[in-house]
Amino acid sequence: MDSLIVPIGVPVTIITVFFVVLCVVSMAFSFGVKYPKVQEYTLDEPWDRAPLLFSATDIEPMALPRHAEPGDVDGGSASGKW
Protein backbone atom coordinates (compact mmCIF):
# COMPACT_ATOMS: atom_id res chain seq x y z
CA MET A 1 0.00 0.00 0.00
CA ASP A 2 2.86 2.39 0.76
CA SER A 3 4.23 1.92 -2.72
CA LEU A 4 1.01 3.31 -4.26
CA ILE A 5 1.07 6.62 -2.38
CA VAL A 6 3.54 8.31 -4.73
CA PRO A 7 2.26 6.96 -8.10
CA ILE A 8 -1.36 7.74 -7.24
CA GLY A 9 -1.04 10.63 -4.77
CA VAL A 10 1.22 12.90 -6.83
CA PRO A 11 -0.95 12.93 -10.00
CA VAL A 12 -4.12 13.40 -7.95
CA THR A 13 -2.52 16.30 -6.09
CA ILE A 14 -1.31 17.90 -9.34
CA ILE A 15 -4.74 17.54 -10.97
CA THR A 16 -6.47 18.99 -7.89
CA VAL A 17 -4.15 22.00 -7.77
CA PHE A 18 -4.64 22.52 -11.52
CA PHE A 19 -8.45 22.58 -11.18
CA VAL A 20 -8.30 24.91 -8.17
CA VAL A 21 -6.15 27.33 -10.18
CA LEU A 22 -8.61 27.09 -13.09
CA CYS A 23 -11.51 27.90 -10.75
CA VAL A 24 -9.71 30.91 -9.29
CA VAL A 25 -8.84 32.23 -12.75
CA SER A 26 -12.43 31.67 -13.91
CA MET A 27 -13.79 33.60 -10.93
CA ALA A 28 -11.30 36.41 -11.52
CA PHE A 29 -12.37 36.87 -15.15
CA SER A 30 -16.11 36.63 -14.45
CA PHE A 31 -16.11 39.23 -11.69
CA GLY A 32 -17.77 41.98 -13.75
CA VAL A 33 -20.40 39.81 -15.44
CA LYS A 34 -23.92 41.10 -14.87
CA TYR A 35 -26.81 38.66 -14.87
CA PRO A 36 -30.37 39.79 -15.64
CA LYS A 37 -32.61 40.31 -12.65
CA VAL A 38 -35.51 37.95 -12.16
CA GLN A 39 -38.78 39.75 -12.74
CA GLU A 40 -40.85 39.63 -9.55
CA TYR A 41 -44.54 38.95 -9.86
CA THR A 42 -47.02 41.24 -8.16
CA LEU A 43 -50.76 40.67 -7.85
CA ASP A 44 -51.63 43.62 -10.09
CA GLU A 45 -49.96 41.94 -13.11
CA PRO A 46 -51.62 39.27 -15.28
CA TRP A 47 -50.30 35.72 -14.83
CA ASP A 48 -48.63 34.69 -18.09
CA ARG A 49 -47.01 31.41 -17.04
CA ALA A 50 -48.31 27.87 -17.29
CA PRO A 51 -50.42 26.58 -14.39
CA LEU A 52 -48.80 24.53 -11.63
CA LEU A 53 -50.46 21.61 -9.89
CA PHE A 54 -49.98 21.15 -6.17
CA SER A 55 -52.32 18.50 -4.86
CA ALA A 56 -52.91 16.53 -1.70
CA THR A 57 -55.31 14.09 -3.35
CA ASP A 58 -54.99 10.80 -5.20
CA ILE A 59 -53.63 12.16 -8.47
CA GLU A 60 -51.28 9.68 -10.14
CA PRO A 61 -47.94 11.49 -9.98
CA MET A 62 -48.60 12.55 -6.41
CA ALA A 63 -50.29 9.42 -5.06
CA LEU A 64 -48.77 7.38 -2.28
CA PRO A 65 -47.21 4.11 -3.34
CA ARG A 66 -49.67 1.22 -3.26
CA HIS A 67 -47.61 -0.63 -0.66
CA ALA A 68 -48.33 2.04 1.96
CA GLU A 69 -50.02 1.08 5.19
CA PRO A 70 -53.85 1.25 5.21
CA GLY A 71 -53.79 3.83 8.00
CA ASP A 72 -51.72 6.26 5.97
CA VAL A 73 -53.48 9.37 4.83
CA ASP A 74 -53.69 9.89 1.08
CA GLY A 75 -54.56 13.55 1.30
CA GLY A 76 -53.84 16.42 3.57
CA SER A 77 -54.51 20.07 3.83
CA ALA A 78 -52.62 23.18 3.02
CA SER A 79 -53.12 26.75 4.07
CA GLY A 80 -51.44 30.00 3.33
CA LYS A 81 -51.53 33.62 4.33
CA TRP A 82 -51.92 36.24 1.64
Image (cartoon, grey):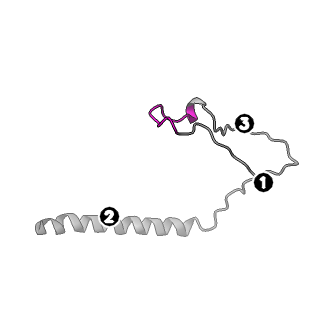
Kindly identify which residue carries mark 3: 51
Kindly identify which residue carries mark 2: 15
The picture quadrant where one finds residue 1 is bottom left
Q: CA distance from mark 1 to mark 2?
A: 52 Å
Relative to 16, say whether 53 is above or below.
Answer: above
Q: Secondary structure at mark 2?
A: helix
Kindly identify which residue carries mark 1: 81
> In the drawing, does residue 21 fall left or right of residue 33?
left
Q: CA distance from mark 1 to mark 3?
A: 20 Å
Q: Earlier in the sequence, mark 2 or mark 3?
A: 2
Q: Which of the two residues, 5 or 48, is positioned nearer the viewer here?
A: 48
Q: Residue 51: give x, y in percent of width and height.
A: 72, 36
Pointer 1 with pointer 3, Cβ within 8 A: no
Q: Nearer the viewer, mark 2 or mark 3?
A: 3
Region in magenta:
61-71
The residue under label 3 is which amino acid type? Answer: Pro
Residue at image point 48% right, 69% down:
24
